[in-house]
Amino acid sequence: MSLAAFVRSAAKKQASEAILRERQLRLSQRDFDAFHAAIHEPFRPAPPLEEALQRARSQVRRV
Amino acid sequence: MFEEQRLDPSRHNRKAFRCGVEALDRFWAQQAGQNRRRGFGETFVLVEASDPDKILGYYTLAPAQVERVALQPDDAASLPLYPVPCCRMGRLALDLSCRGQGLGSLLLALAVERCLEVRQSIGGYALLVDAKDEVAVQFYAHHGFRRFQDSPRSLYLPLGPQSDRGVDSASR
């Protein structure tokens, strides 16, 4: 492998590792257990979020 | 009336936008377009319909996944497949001139709405955010995001089981 090819492949590997890091969240056992339970609850927005969702639906045209 | 648009570097005037947080402003000036090409995610901007050149704020969304640190061999067999697919809002910023009008909440709601649609079509169990400071943590917590005990700067909003979303959308 030429030096240039090596540098290119190392840079590519680094970039894909950066994407992977950005995409992964690693949780402790207790956080994962709480998270896992929470995602099985029905979606019920807190009042401030519900209010903002209503405003978004009435005041924002999405393109 | 407002409009939400996908960031288009050839059309949106990014130079006029400043939120006052240096890291966010640098990202905005240099990387928002690159990020999309590299697959880090999409950027969406909020503008006034009557003044579409002026960007009021933006957020970015990307796919993400949640895993646990160490899997004990004993529980591994009894649990469903991991990692858990999610959405991550990497950034949310508001122009300095737009503070105090609830537009941060509005941007957050637009991101949540988009994630609920993603949830419905291709899955995504929660919206993840990384808060840059305690003020940001409070902002997300106020809107119902939950904290992790061992990852204090990350928060998440559970989006509900998929069947729920169907019921919700139908009743809207």
Image (cartoon, coloured by chain):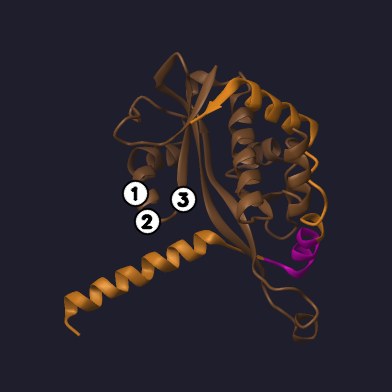
Residue type (three-letter) at the residue carrying disc 3: Gly
- Kind of residue at badge 1: Gln
Q: Which residue is mark 1?
A: B34
Image location (x, y in percent) of residue B142: 74, 35
Q: Secondary structure beneath disc 1?
A: helix
> Does residue B35 show up magenta in the picture?
no
Magenta-drawn segment: A27-36
Q: Is residue B128 left or right of residue A12?
A: right
Q: Chain of mark 3?
A: B
What secondary structure is the stretch in magenta mostly built from?
A: helix
Above or below B91: residue B72: below
- Front one among B55 and A59: A59
Task: Name the colour assigned to chain A in the rendering.
Answer: orange
The chain identifier of the residue carrying mark 1 reads: B
SS for callout 2: helix
Q: Quadrant of residue A56?
A: top right
Residue hosting label 2: B38
Residue found 82% across the figure and 60% down from its top = A37
Name the quadrant of the N terminus of chain B: top right
Apparent colour of chain B? brown
Measure the alpha-carbon separation of dots 3 and 1: 10 Å
Q: Which residue is mark 3?
A: B41
Question: What whole-number distance in Å separates the C-alpha atoms at marks 3 and 2?
Answer: 8 Å
